[in-house]
Image (spheres, helix red, strand yellow):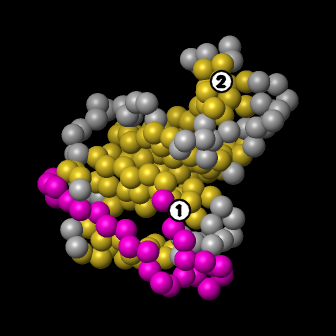
Amino acid sequence: MFTGTWAGFGYVASTNTGQVEVSIDGVSQGTVDTYAASARPQSAYYNNLASSTHTLTLRLLSTRNPLSTGNNFDFDFFDTWDGTPLPRGQAEAPFAKTWNWTEDVSPVASTGRYFRDGTAMWSAFTGERVIYQALATSWAGQVEVSIDGLTRGVVSLVNPTRRRFARSRTRTWAAAHTCCRCGR
């Protein structure tokens, strides 16, 4: 159960995962096919809920994508927002993240510290612009940046020397949203 106007969940889509029915307050919101040709973090969000207490239910079905080899569901996280306005241009702090991140130090990082080698991190935000900052290095790969579960770009962080990298995305958003950085 949660109280709020917005909820979501994250999972790892993979070659052996099935389909999940999503219900809010006993009303089906549809089926999510969690299959992917290779393992990758995904998320699904539901907004415009009444500002009250809700129950979000995920039910693994016996159906699956014809390409899937199994009916598993690899749940990762549950996220809610209570409808309280965030200050304009503000994001929740700290970012929520999967368990597998390593915190490291570098004088090039804007705060002197950065996270590396993880699967996904995300944050709720309001405002018209998202700035994604990362440390580009010779050993870095690509990251997918998504907003509300939709891919907004794939960014290569490969660079011969360590440097700070920033990319912005401008759009008018009227409510809270999530921004996710997913490794590739």
Quadrant in the rendering for residue 70: bottom right
User: In the rendering, at what x and y percent does residue 84 appear?
Assistant: 21, 40
Q: Which residue, given by chain and number where applicable, does mark 1 sit on?
A: 74
Spot occupied by residue 124 in the image (x, y as percentages of width and height): 39, 42
Bounds of the magenta span?
Answer: 50-75
Judging from the image, what secondary structure is the residue with disc 2 in? strand
**Residue 86 higher or lower than 105, as above or below:** below
Of residues 150 and 141, the one nearer the viewer is 141
Task: Tell me which residue sits at (63%, 66%) in the image.
Answer: 14
Q: Nearer the viewer, mark 2 or mark 1?
A: 1
Q: Is residue 94 above or below residue 53?
A: above
* Three-letter amino acid code at the position of disc 1: Asp
Residue 135: x and y, percent? 68, 29
Residue 152 at x, y = what percent?
A: 56, 52
Classified by dominant secondary structure, the portion drawn in magenta counts as: loop
Q: Earlier in the sequence, mark 2 or mark 1?
A: 1
Q: Nearer the viewer, residue 6 or 13?
A: 13
Residue 170 visible in this rendered orientation of the protein? no
Above or below residue 75? Residue 85 is: above
Q: Quadrant of residue 53?
A: bottom left
Q: Is residue 108 magenta?
A: no
- Residue at 46 percent of width and 35 percent of height: 95
